[in-house]
Amino acid sequence: MFAMLLIAAIAAPQPSDIHAIEVTRATAPYVSHARDGRAFVEFGPTVETRNVSCNLQGEGIFDCAYEARIKDFFVSDFGAWLPKRERIAFRDNCWQIVSPK
């Protein structure tokens, strides 16, 4: 019963959550690991997101629509805004993109 209340209490992802997902996706190819195993990105891209809108689809699953653009580290201007649609769920203490059913 408690688990059902916990799931019901999960609010929709915030714009900052969507931004964090996009930053993770954009920097993934640039990740290096230090000797102690910690991951880092030295020359990663900058990511911006806007117009975030999320709708509940099921138990803690949301369909989100937003726009994102990326500026690579050595480039002076951002690329064009790209519309995105993702299914997002709260798993392992963070918001993650899940594949649609």
Image (cartoon, rainbow, N blue to C red):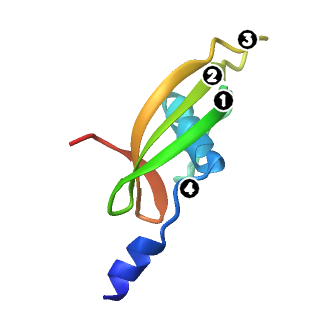
Instruction: Report the residue marked by disc 1.
Output: 47
Q: Quadrant of the N terminus?
A: bottom left
> Between tags 3 and 2, which lies in front?
2
Instruction: Report the residue marked by disc 4.
Output: 36
Q: Amino acid at mark 3?
A: Val
Q: Secondary structure at mark 3?
A: loop
Say which residue appears at 66% left-offset and 25% top-offset: 45
Decide which of 74, 97 is in the foreground and name it. 97
Q: Which numbered marker is on residue 32?
A: none
Instruction: Report the residue marked by disc 2.
Output: 69
> Between tags 2 and 4, which lies in front?
2
Q: Amino acid at mark 2?
A: Arg
Rendered image quadrant of residue 97:
top left
Bin the neighbour count of mark 2 within 10 Å (Cα to Cα): few under 14, some 14-19, many 20 and up: some
Say which residue appears at 60% left-offset and 26% top-offset: 68
Decide which of 38, 59 is in the foreground and name it. 59
Instruction: Report the residue marked by disc 3.
Output: 75
List x then y, in percent, for residue 5: 40, 81
